[in-house]
Amino acid sequence: MTEVVHAGAVAKYCDGGWRCALIFGPSGAGKSDLALRALQAGWRLVSDDYSCVWPSGGSLWARAPEAIADRIEARGLGIEIEPALQFARACLAVVCDSSEVERLPAPETMALQGIDLPCIHLNPLEASALIKVDRALSTRREK
């Protein structure tokens, strides 16, 4: 069963496939800003703002809702066309948080559709935010 979550998704090709990070946060939190920086760094868009997620084969998968596929909202520019992947395996949850993030957080997971994803909290507007997402995607594994 597919669930729609308020999260964008960007993917990087690694470990033989497209692995995506689901980016959660309220409107205006910086989800799309972080996604745009990922695209500039060679990542691919899966979805902006909302994602359809579903479990299959012990993994969680994500795609864009049809109505917003291949689009990303760039605050100050408007809605831009951005060819997106049809789907990708969701391997990380990123929670956008503009308050001070814990320096040495305990490992955390987020359960979606019965799958536990590694979860990190970060300020998406920090210069190092994408680097942190990249490292977490590479070093943490879903359970």
Image (cartoon, rainbow, N blue to C red):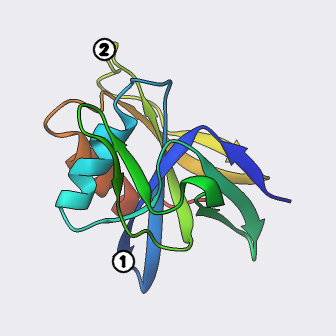
Is 83 or 39 nearer to us in this picture?
83
Element type at mark 1: strand
Q: Which mark is residue 80?
A: none
Residue highlighted by disc 2: 100
The residue sitting at 55% across, 74% down in the picture is 86
In primary-sequence order, the first of circles 1 and 2 is 1
x 30%, y 14%: residue: 100
Q: Is residue 80 left or right of residue 59?
A: left
Identified by mark 2, the residue type is Glu
Residue plotted at (46% across, 62% down): 20
Q: Residue at x 58, y 59 (%)?
A: 64
The answer to which of 95 and 105 lies nearer the viewer is: 95
Q: Position of residue 111 (x, y in %)?
A: 70, 44
Q: Residue furthest top?
A: 99
Q: Position of residue 53 (x, y in %)?
A: 68, 57
Q: Kindly identify which residue carries mark 1.
A: 14
- The reply to whether residue 28 is in sight is yes
Q: Judge by depth and name the residue closer to the eye, 140 or 30.
A: 30
Q: Badge 1: how crowded within 10 Å, few (<14), some, or many (20+)?
A: few
